Image (cartoon, helix red, strand yellow):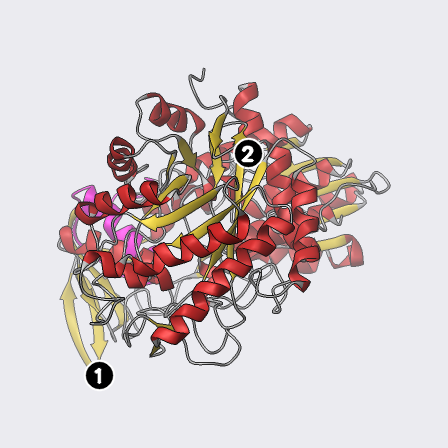
């Protein structure tokens, strides 16, 4: 099936066994002092075990104030060496190679995570995400940072890493010097092209002096920054020629800088697959050193195709590695149904980092928990009964079955998937179906017995007498207590998305959260009529992820969806709704009202099962309505510890 994906290729004098690369991602798994933890080690070891050719660790800070996140690795003191040597030893038990990325976050840091100091940068311009004004570096300080990179690289080599990656992309410190977007200096580090390249050149030379001539050095940089005034390919072509002349061994062709409106930083489900691979292809035309292509490449066949047509030499599939660290081994074996696909939701891998938490993955609750989900000592075999076939229920069934239990799952409808089924219907979210398909296939593989069209009752539970019951009955749409709510012209977003209720004409969506906004876009793309979203709060999707929201609002604008914020629906009439804003009611004519005002826990069975005592676990939305990320993780944990 593959032409090039599993052929080896060198970076410098190091042979990479295949072309699949885990490019650097912030995990927040280390200590605040930059030391590796067992969680960090196990997370990377799982990828090596899964067959990735090259693993690049993320953002090792070159000094204690260079950190952009609080719990990333460090290489600013010799005490770090032994801690991270444990990582390279774990990875080297397998065929994978591991490079260490070193960086200084520059303005994309914050005093709350970098040791309590004001961030420093090429120029005093605040990052749109961290929003703390940085201090402009002096020339003397720049020289010290150059030395920091060199000594950090020496420690990287001593810790047993196979190579080092200098991070000169994504708006971090070196990247800022390279681009007019951030660099407003008029000294030897600003102005003309060669001046702006000076810091990268000095860092490279210092790193090379510390690691020797035969140690692989690669550079990650943003080929296109995707911002007004930022660098595009025209200047990036010049940069890659310089890097090759200096002696750099490979180029990691990234994109973007921090910012909610920047599509290049992390691409969500609304961006095309491999959408920036043409940048890597342009770079590859100009250099003879290996080039890594990246950005929303999730399928191994797609990766092989990109290699075969000469777009790049290696394929970075970082978030695909979160969803399934064993993707390479499964692809090589032809186990297509067994591959857990990244769905581009960004809920855990990016969303958690907003709050300084360790990152997670919606479709892979074991990611980041490899250190505790070990399967080393199997428990006494039990009969486990799972009630509910949504994400939480299926994850619970899978975890329990992997632990050796006999598992049965009861779902009252004729389909598995729960609320994740309608979630796949709005434009851009079709890939959500891959998760449901994987869950079903995994349960089948593990021998879970599934009963569809079977409503679990207390009597059924008593008759089966299981050792453990996991209640994952999900949530049901909220129905606010307003006059006219039971009229025939009122339907729920869930039923509309699933095609069970058809609406057209003048449509009011009651609720402007993520579900309401996505339902409005779904109807607009189906050309069902004129759509107005009514939201009680002063902002549409106020608590939603900023990057996702930018894409949703763009889609809504393209289709002419109207919004009414700070507005309540206080009554549903035969020919419309009564809206209230600032205490003033008005009749708003419409043909249908679609309810998207949230969910409540479907926990009616919970009290009836109280006789089970600690034999009962309640998970997902049946415990408290949240999101699929929470449901996935809570369900899996309950199954694992059943």
Q: Which residue lies furthest to the right in this view?
A: 380
Q: Which residue is drawn at 70% across and 43% down?
A: 89
The answer to the question of whether label 1 and label 2 lie on touching residues, with beta carbons closer than 8 A, is no
Instruction: From this view, report whether residue 611 is shown above or below residue 126.
Output: above
The image position of residue 514, as x and y in percent, is: 35, 58
Report helix, strand or loop for mark 2.
loop
Task: Please provide the residue range marked out in magenta.
Answer: 499-528
Give the class, few, some or many, for how many residues have Cα within 10 Å of label 2's Cα (few <14, many ≥20). Answer: many
Q: Quadrant of residue 259?
A: bottom left
Whichever of callouts 1 and 2 sits on the residue coming sooner in the sequence is 2
Instruction: Specify the quadrant of the image occupied by residue 171.
Output: bottom left
- In the rendered image, is residue 304 in sight? yes
* The disc label shown at residue 52, or none: 2
420 left or right of 617?
Answer: left
Q: In the rendered view, would you say 169 is above or below 243?
A: below
Question: Label 1 neighbourhood size at 10 Å, few (<14), some (14-19), many (20+)?
Answer: few
Nearest to viewer (mark 1 / mark 2): 2
**Residue 500 highlighted magenta (yes or no):** yes
Residue 194 forms part of the magenta stretch:
no
Return the x and y of residue 83 as percentages of the image width and height: 69, 57
Residue 523 is situated, as x and y percent measured from the top left of the image, at 23, 47
Q: In this view, does 545 lie above or below 363?
A: below
- How far across and down, in percent of the image, does residue 349 sit? 48, 53
- In the figure, is residue 32 to the left or right of 586? right
Pick the quarter of the image with the N terminus: top left
Q: In which quarter of the image is residue 578?
A: bottom left
Of residues 4 and 211, the one nearer the viewer is 211
Instruction: Please report the residue visible at 66 percent of the width from the left and 48 percent of the height from the top.
Output: 87
Q: Return the residue at label 1.
A: 582
Q: Distance between the residues labelled 1 and 2?
A: 58 Å
As helix, strand or loop, the secondary structure at mark 1 comes to loop
- Label of residue 49 in the image: none
């Amino acid at each position: 099936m593959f032409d090039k994906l599993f052929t080896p290729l060198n970076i410098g004098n190091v042979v990479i066994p295949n072309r699949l690369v885990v490019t650097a991602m912030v995990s927040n798994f280390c200590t605040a002092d930059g030391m590796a933890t067992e969680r960090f080690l196990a997370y990377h070891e799982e990828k090596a075990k899964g067959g990735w050719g090259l693993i690049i660790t993320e953002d090792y800070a070159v000094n204690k104030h260079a950190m952009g996140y609080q719990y990333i690795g460090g290489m600013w003191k010799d005490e770090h060496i032994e801690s991270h040597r444990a990582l390279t030893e774990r990875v080297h038990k397998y065929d994978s190679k591991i490079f260490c990325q070193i960086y200084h976050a520059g303005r994309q840091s914050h005093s709350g995570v970098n040791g309590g100091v004001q961030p420093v940068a090429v120029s005093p311009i605040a990052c749109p995400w961290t929003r703390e004004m940085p201090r402009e570096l002096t020339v003397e300080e720049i020289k010290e940072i150059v030395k920091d990179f060199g000594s950090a690289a020496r420690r990287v080599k001593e810790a047993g890493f196979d190579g080092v990656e200098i991070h000169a992309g994504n708006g971090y410190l070196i990247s800022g010097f390279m681009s007019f977007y951030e660099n407003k200096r008029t000294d030897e580090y600003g102005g003309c092209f060669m001046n702006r390249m000076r810091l990268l050149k000095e860092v490279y030379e210092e790193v090379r002096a510390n690691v020797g001539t035969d140690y692989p050095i690669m550079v990650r940089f943003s080929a296109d920054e995707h911002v007004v005034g930022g660098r595009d390919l025209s200047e990036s072509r010049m940069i890659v020629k310089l890097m090759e002349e200096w002696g750099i061994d490979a180029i990691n062709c990234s994109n973007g800088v921090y910012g909610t409106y920047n599509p290049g930083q992390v691409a969500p489900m609304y961006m095309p697959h491999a959408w920036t691979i043409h940048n890597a292809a342009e770079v590859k035309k100009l250099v003879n050193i290996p080039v890594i292509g990246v950005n929303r490449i999730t399928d191994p066949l797609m990766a092989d195709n990109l290699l075969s047509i000469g777009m790049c030499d290696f394929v970075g599939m970082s978030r695909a590695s979160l969803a399934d660290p064993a993707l390479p081994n499964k692809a090589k074996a032809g186990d297509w149904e067994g591959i857990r696909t990244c769905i581009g939701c960004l809920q855990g891998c990016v969303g958690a980092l907003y709050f300084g938490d360790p990152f997670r993955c919606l479709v892979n609750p074991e990611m980041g928990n490899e250190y505790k989900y070990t399967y080393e000592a199997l428990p006494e075999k039990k009969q486990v009964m799972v009630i509910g076939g949504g994400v939480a229920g299926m994850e619970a069934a899978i975890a329990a079955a992997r632990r050796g239990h006999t598992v049965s799952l009861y779902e009252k409808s004729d389909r598995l998937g729960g609320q994740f089924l309608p979630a796949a219907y709005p434009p851009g979210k079709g890939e959500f179906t891959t998760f449901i398909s994987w869950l079903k296939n995994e349960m089948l593989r593990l021998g879970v017995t599934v009963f569809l069209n079977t409503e679990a009752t207390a009597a059924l539970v008593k008759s089966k007498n299981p050792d453990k019951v996991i209640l994952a009955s999900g949530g049901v749409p909220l129905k606010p207590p307003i006059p006219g709510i039971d009229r025939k012209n009122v339907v729920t977003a869930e039923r509309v998305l699933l095609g069970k209720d058809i609406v057209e004409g003048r449509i009011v969506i009651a609720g402007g959260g993520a579900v309401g906004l996505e339902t409005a876009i779904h109807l607009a793309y189906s050309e069902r009529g004129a759509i107005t979203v009514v939201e009680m709060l002063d902002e549409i999707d106020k608590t939603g992820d900023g990057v996702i929201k930018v894409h949703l609002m763009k889609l809504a604008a393209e289709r002419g969806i109207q919004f009414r914020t700070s507005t309540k629906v206080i009554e549903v009439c035969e020919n419309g709704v009564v809206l209230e804003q600032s205490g003033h009611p008005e009749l708003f004519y419409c043909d249908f009202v679609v309810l998207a005002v949230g969910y409540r826990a479907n926990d009616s069975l919970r009290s009836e099962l109280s006789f089970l005592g600690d034999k009962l676990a309640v998970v997902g939305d049946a415990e408290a309505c949240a999101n699929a990320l929470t449901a996935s993780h809570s369900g899996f944990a309950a199954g694992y510890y059943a």
